[in-house]
Image (cartoon, rainbow, N blue to C red):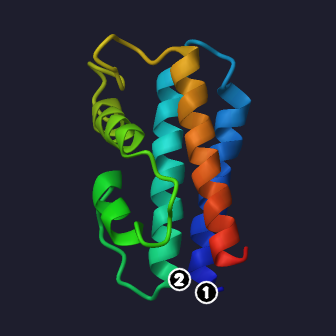
Amino acid sequence: MRAFTKEWLKAAQDDLMTIEEIIKNDQLTHIVAFHSQQCIEKVMKAIIEEEEIDIPKIHKLSKLNEIVSSKLKNVDTNLITILDSLYIESRYPGDMGLLPHGKPTIQDAREFYTFAKNIYLEAEKLLNA
């Protein structure tokens, strides 16, 4: 495995660890969504790095997923779309990563975390990490 691939995976793992520390706090569900998005982005960039493809300087999961879709098989494109919108919104204080019905619920946060963790674990197997 390439050195930068390992670094991307370590950074993704750090996002998962951050989520695990805050997942029960209903005031931080938007932060869980942010770190879920970040974890998935870093996992996808790890796969791109390992394939020796130039990593695009983008954060949009749907675009990154187009690049890695032949490698990652269990990607829920609906959740990708939701996390993409939450990531963009979380960058601006007024909205703080809101879904159409408001701030993500604890249930939403758990779903995002589980999704990110499953993608991470799939990538670990794929990359023999």
Residue at disc 2, secondary structure: helix
Label for residue 2? 1
Quick check: 3 left or right of 97? right
Quick check: 89 left or right of 104? left
CB under 8 Å between callouts 2 and 1?
yes
Measure how far apart labels 2 and 1 are at the Cα level: 6 Å
The mark total stands at: 2
Residue in the image at 66% along x and 39% along y? 18
**Location of the C terminus (image quadrant):** bottom right
Above or below, comparing residue 82 to residue 55 in the picture:
above
Query: Dot 2, crowdedness within 10 Å: few (<14), some or many (≥20)?
Result: some
User: In front: 27, or 114?
Assistant: 114
Residue 7, image x, y percentages: 62, 71
Residue in the image at 52% along x and 54% along y? 74
Residue 120, image x, y percentages: 62, 56
Residue at disc 1, secondary structure: loop
Above or below, comparing residue 29 to residue 46 in the picture:
above
Residue in the image at 65% along x and 16% along y? 25
- Circle 2 is placed at which residue position? 50
Q: Amino acid at mark 1?
A: Arg
Mark earlier in primary sequence (2, 1): 1
Say whether residue 60 is visible. Answer: no
**Location of the N terminus (image quadrant):** bottom right
Q: Amino acid at mark 2?
A: Glu
Residue 98, image x, y percentages: 34, 20
Quadrant in the picture for residue 4:
bottom right
Quick check: 114 left or right of 64? right
Label for residue 36? none
Residue 68, image x, y percentages: 41, 69
